[in-house]
Image (tube, helix red, strand yellow):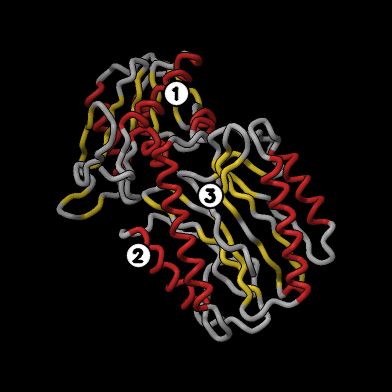
Amino acid sequence: MSKYAIDPDACRGRQQRLIEVMRREDFDCVIVTQAAHVQWLTGAHVPWLFQSTAVLDARGKLTVAGPSKPEISGTLDEYIPYDAKWHSTLRNDQRQAASSALLEHLGNSLAGKRIGVEYSSFDQHLAHAVDATFVDVEPELYYLRRRKDADELARIRQAISATERMYARAREIIQPGITEIEVFNALQATAVSEFGEPLTGTGNDYQCGSRGGPPRHARAAAAGELYILDLGPAFRGYFADNARTIAVSTPNEIQLEAWTYIMKAFDHIEATVRPGKSAKALFGEVQDILDTAPVGVFNHHLGHGIGLFPHEAPHLNPHWDDTFEEGDVFTAEPGLYASELQVGMRIENDYLVTATGVELLTPFSLEL
C-alpha cells in the first residue's frame, strides 16, 4: 500500500478527537461542509468542483453525502450519493443536492438536536430545514487540525519534497533575461514530475525585483536583483510553504550582510521553539534581531501553521497569542527589505514541533 494512501486508523483517531469535543460540549452530532474538514475526517481529498457534507454522531458513526461520480472513497460508515452532474454537466446546485440527499436519508433524526456546525459556511439549506440548535464548532475544528498525524505528515513531506526540486531547478535556470512566466512554468513542471500527478495547489510569489506576486509574462530578471520565490505546492490537499531568495547574478556585499541576519533569526528559532513557547513572543524576539540589521526592514508576519490550508495555527504574528504545541507544523519566514537590497529577501523554512524542540523539514540550501 502506498504511504500516501488513506490511513483508516488515523482517520478514526481524528474522528475520536472530535467526539471528545462533542461530549464536552454536549453535541448530538457535528455537520461539516468545508472540503478540508471532510478530508480531515475521512482522509479523502475532495476535488474542488464537488460538494460534500459529513455528519459525525455521538456514537462515532460518520455519514457522508457526496457525488455519485467520483464517489468519495474514505474512512466512513455510510455514503449517500447524489448526482453532481446531469448528462456530464456539473450542477451549480450541488450544495442543495447534497443537503437534500442527506435530509432524505436522515429523516427527522436531527430534529431537536444540539448540532455543531461551521458558522462561517454552514449550509442554509440544512439550517432552514431542520429544527435544531446549531452551535459553532469551527474554532474547535481548526484547533484539532493543528496536531498532524503520520498520514498528514507524509503528504506534507511529499509537498515539501517538490519545493526542494523546484528550488534546485530555479538555481539552474535563473539568470539575467529569463522571464517570470518562464520560471513559473519550469517550476510547475518540476513539481508535477515530482508528484507524478497534478498539483492540488501552488504558491503565490514568483516575481523578481518584487516582494511577491504572480508571475508576469514580459518581466525579465536583471543582473544584481534578488529573486524571491515563495513556493507552496499542495499534494493531495496538503500544502508546503517555504521561500528561498536567489541572486540573479553574484550577490553583493550588502545583500550578503543582510542574509547573515536572516540566519541569526533561524538560529534563534531553532534554539528556542518547543512546546509551551509563545509564538507571539517569538515574533518579537526575531523582530528585535532583524531590527539590528544595518539595512532593511522586517514588517510582516514571521510565519504560520500549514496543513490542509496554506495558513493555519499557530500564528507567528503579533495579532494572535498562540502557543506552540507538539505536532504543529509551521513556517518561519524572516525577511529584510530595502531599495539597497534590490527590493530585499525572504527565506522560509518549515518545521515540525516535537516534544523537545523542532525538526527542520526543509534542509536544503538557504544560500542567495
Q: Secondary structure at mark 3?
A: loop
Question: Quadrant of the image for the N terminus?
Answer: top left
Q: Which residue is mark 2?
A: 193
Real-space CA distance between mark 1 and mark 3, rounded to the nearest whole angstrom: 26 Å
Residue 78 in percent (x, y) is at: 23, 27
Residue 361, which numbered label?
Answer: 3
Q: Residues within 10 Å of mark 3 (few under 14, many from 20)?
A: some
Identify the mark nearer the N-term, 1 or 3: 1
Q: Does 302 appear above or below 255?
A: above
Identify the mark nearer the N-term, 2 or 1: 1
Query: Callout 2, which amino acid?
Result: Ser
Residue 244 in percent (x, y) is at: 59, 64
Please name whichever residue, 284 or 9, is drawn nearer the observer in this view of the structure.
9
Residue at image position (42%, 40%) is 152
Is 348 displayed left or right of 257 in the figure?
Answer: left
Please name whichever residue, 191 or 179, is drawn nearer the observer in this view of the structure.
191
Q: Which residue is mark 1?
A: 17
Which of labels 2 and 1 is toward the front?
2
Which of labels 3 and 2 is toward the front?
3
Query: Callout 1, which amino acid?
Result: Arg
Is 367 displayed left or right of 56 in the figure?
Answer: right
Residue at image position (44%, 42%) is 153
Residue at image position (78%, 73%) is 254
